[in-house]
Image: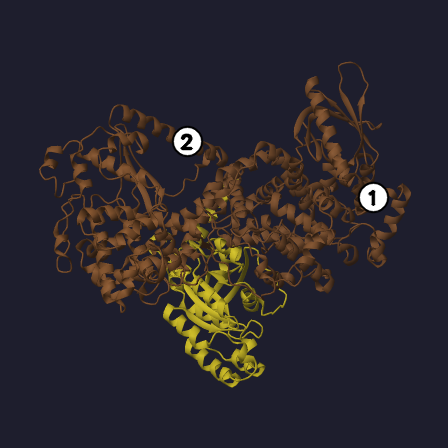
Amino acid sequence: MAESGSGTADKSVQVKLVLLGEAAVGKSSIVLRFVSNEFQANKEPTIGAAFLTQKCRLEDRVLRYEIWDTAGQERFHSLAPMYYRNAQAAVVVYDVTKASSLEKAKSWVKELQRQANPNIVIALAGNKLDLVQPSASSSGATSTPESEDEADDATATPGEAAAAGDQPESLRQVPRDEAEAYAKEAGLLFFETSAKTGDGVVEIFTEIAKKIPIEHILASSRGTGRPGAAGRTGGAQEGGVNLEENAAKSKDACNC
Amino acid sequence: MSTISTQLRSFKEPTKDQLTQLSFSIPSSLTDRADKDGLEKMEINAVLSLSAEAEEDSYAGKLHLFPPFLSFASLDRKSCRFTLPLCTIRRVERLNARAGIYALSLSLWHGMKIIVQLTSLRPTADLFCSMLRDALKAELQHGQMKAVRSFVKTCYSETLVASTGPLVDEELEEKTPLEGEEGSRGTDIPYHVGLGLKFKFPGDPKKLREASKVKLWTTYLKTHGRNLTLLRYPQCTRLVQVGLPNRLRGEMWEVLSGSLYLRFSYPGMYQQILKENEGRTSTSTEDIEKDLHRSLPEYSAYQSEEGISALRRVLQAYSFKNPELGYCQAMNILAAALLIYMSEEQAFWLLEVICDRLLPGYYSTSMHGTLLDQRVFESLVQKCLPIIHDHFQVVDVQLSVASLPWFLSLFINSMPMVFACRIIDCFFCMGPKVLFQVGLAILKINGEELLKIQDDGGFIQLMRSYFSSLGNSAHPHSADPRARAITRFQELLLVSFREFAIITDDTIYNERRKYRNDIIFSIESFSKRAAVRNLSTLERFTKEQAGLVYDALYRAMCIVPPPAPVAKPAPSLIGDGSEEKPETRIGLRTFRIFLSEIATWARDEKVIINGIQQRVERDVAEHEFIDRLFYFWDVSCKGALSFQDLVSGLDGVMFNDLMENIEWFFNLHDKNKDGFLTKDEVLQLSESLLFIFRFEVGDAYLGAVSRFMTNAFEYGDALLPQPEDKRESDDVPPSDIGHNQPYLNLATFRMVVLADEILESFFETDLSACFKLEPVPMMDLPSSHNGFLGDLISNIATDDNKKLFNRFTDRIGQTIGRHQVIHRPAIGKYTKLDEPKARESLLIPSMRQSPTSPSTSSLATTARAPSPSNASTSNLSAAETLVQPPDISPLNMVKNANEALMERPQFAIDDALDDDTDDELGGEDDGVMDEVDAFLEAHDSGLTEEQRELAKGKSFSDQ
């Protein structure tokens, strides 16, 4: 917080992002890959939610993602609203090798669309792509800079096609088409990723960044009045506004 | 797919007795055992002193006998206390002291003698002594006394104390830096050890001043008992607060938390559970596998198979022991931490105590305990640190985002291990309030910084950096070196226990009580939303309607919980790799209640008016028809219905038009689904109709059903290939061929139904309309301020009061002649009895005579005084005038109506009927009599009008 409040970050925009999905689909690994470009096979399980931050450059803007990586076990479900409230973006993760995880993902999407911030940008990510891809294709996919959703498609499909019939592909339980069609229908960004190889991970975050109404957040956080009228991305606005108010207020508070 | 749990509603506040017992860490399973032996509990005022030359003070307090335990707490409830298993008492002597003093000397296993002076009145003291004697005898008989010797050997403290003073020092000097050596000594250690002995304990032993801590504890344990016989004097608490020595830690956790008593009382159970469940998998074991490698992965033992498999065994054993809870993330971290300091068996029992008593509901499937304590914590912050609380409100920061893991993993996940362990030391010693005290202290210490944060993220980061600085000096710039030496962690404990000493067990207890209902409510509404959202299809319902179905289901489940709680994966799971996700399914009994909420004919509703009040009494109806519906909806043939089954089932009838309804009703009774009803099924179908119509006003429906039967059999017979078959039924009623053979097909059934105006309109609209989705009056959750138990009692009380009041007003109503009971009809369409006419086309001319049955005409003419409630005998005086006999089984009704309708004995079925089922369908006279009464009541005023037309339709005006 301190840094975003200081002068250097006048162009950085805070975006609250939440990761949801069934247990052990690799939510934490995706975050870890994005935040520190690492893959750890042994990741501490998330109690409630882990909190991480990462900056993401987009054109001349810097987005500062505040990432809430939630616990996947079913019984933690009732805690999730605490984390996704006021979120501007959500990544719902499933495991391409586990059909039931897509069902769970769908139910998360439903919940988000009903309960969360109405303008939330939701991305659907099918993780563990490495398990269904021959190892060769992964390198190609990572390096490709993708500007569009469709581009992602184009790069990934050949690899997959090549893999078809191979041993690994048989592990796949969620066909890309099926998930993508669902994502399209539900109005979600769609990716297949591998936190292990890094495939598609950064893309999730850059695509989300493009879709987020940054101008709006910026405008409201620069403005002085309460941006209540705008009604969207409430969390960031409040945070931003209060930043300004804060300078004076915190001093007062300390005195008493 | 989801589970619906009403478990939270069955929560019961512990009684005062139970609370006291809990405060002594006495497992209730053990005292229950003694309860069965008829051993009673008792408490008595007493003064405790140590007989040894020790200059310890004496403490006045209360001595409690909780067979098989004897426990004591000083008046302030914290300075001095003990919990002794009776089997550790070797000898009890009455001290021959001065007159008027009644004192016992107890010699304990470890050789100490304690003196308790009983200060209550003499007879009380005598009673106490005799009960103590009985309890001790029982323990002796159970052979527990013998078990002590071998058990204490498993405790490290024995070895520690046995090695004499200088030796201890020596051992420590040489061992502490080289703990690893211990591990190689390996197997011949008699006492239980944790992984730490082999893989080293976290922290630097020098810095932790292990040696001097051990020395202090050795002295204390020598004079104040140890393991089973530990007496907790103030010194003990002080020693715990400076941190337990690593090697003693596991045992002390056991002793302080009371899990030691479980391990002592259930020897071998841990191994047994593992053995019995070997190779078994469940959702829990799967979840456990996922987390094994991410439980304190930085600790070396958990990078080895040895540590991992120990962790696996403990977590699995617990999930098998408590399948309802199973496994919850965070327990792995907890267990991993415990295993550093204690053996698997020790950790297993300690986990049990934590989940069951210390952090109740924390790890349950709803995690209600966690949510509740977060709410309590927030409320305490509001009270103790209002400025911080207000600031959090303003910037919309939720406390729980940071504090939830503190509580859920006892700070292990938040702080460096050495510090978390010290908080855990205090937690086991002083109870769950410690978590709140430390939590408040954390916020207080960081107060100024916290007032600068603007969002959840800032809060988390501030906490993170604070926790990583706990080892730093709290006053780095102080001139005083002693002040500089105080670490931030020490400061934290100081603030926790000094400034937040006001947070007591009672505070926590009361706050939990205060918020429990809020939490239950929010969990319930959350799971309702989830259940509706997770329906695989809403069918034609809206979400709101599905919500109403859920409400009815939930209410039914509260009244009759489903037979086998699904959350309990039964032993049947053994072997089958992974089971389906558990799903709540209800049985027939619950279904009846559910249906009574929705279908008007599935309940018996009486409107009772007694001149003072008017009320509606509702009972759940029972009828074969309802059972049939249950199995009809059970499409997956599981003998139980899920929420989805109910929604789909209701959808199958609530949106139907005439033809669909006729078909639906037909299929419902066509048990073997061959497209034909048998004769029996036709009868059953008629019974179903009569059941639905049982409270309808007048005879219209009765007539309709009887016409239906006549027609059905007439046409059935006509269409039957072998004409001789139908004559069969003349002989003996419930017998032979025709009854269970295909008889009536859908087309015929439809024709017969459509022949009758009433039935047609019933199938056209009324049948579907009988299913009403209305807001269900939710079971009262007691209002919060009184606390759950208090309210429960007051609820019951008021319920009783209400009944009393009702009975009272009824009686008044009877005496002043204004009491009446009206059965609310399921359809209630014909409030005026303008008889709808049967269609002639299909019927014999005689049918045209509309029902001027003797019963109805006599009804109409009988003007009489209001009858008492609930009909029955006193009612009969009035009923005598009725021609209609009081025994009105549906079939009898048909018979009567039939006779009334037409003197037409040509259908043998009439005779067959009453032989058939007279008896089994009796017992409904009450209801019918009520109906009669109500009918008469309503006609009290308008008699003249009635008499206008006796034979034909009477107008029923129920203003």
Residue depicted at x 56% and y 43%: B447
Disc 2/disc 1 C-alpha distance (Å): 58 Å
Q: Which part of the image, by quadrant, shows the C terminus of chain B?
A: top left
User: Circle 1: is it few (<14), some (14-19), or many (20+) Cα within 10 Å?
Assistant: some
- Label 2, on which residue? B800
- Label 1, on which residue? B158
Q: Which chain is painted in brown?
A: B
Res B863 quadrant in image: top left
Residue at the left extreme, as displayed: B948
Residue depicted at x 59% and y 56%: B329
Res B99 quadrant in image: top right
Q: Is residue B209 above or below residue A46?
A: above
Q: Secondary structure at mark 2?
A: helix
Q: In the image shown, does B904 or B812 lie closer to the viewer?
A: B904
Q: Secondary structure at mark 1?
A: helix
Please report, as a chain letter, where disc 1 is located.
B
Residue depicted at x 26% and y 44%: B695
User: Circle 2: is it few (<14), some (14-19), or many (20+) Cα within 10 Å?
Assistant: few
Please report, as a chain letter, where disc 2 is located.
B
Numbered disc total:
2
Colour in which the image shows chain A: yellow
In screen coordinates, is B468 left or right of B798? right
Q: Position of residue A189 (x, y in %)?
A: 42, 70
Residue type, label 2: Asp
Q: Is residue B623 visible?
A: yes
* Colour setup of the view: by chain
Residue type, label 1: Glu
Q: Which part of the image, by quadrant, shows the N terminus of chain B?
A: bottom left
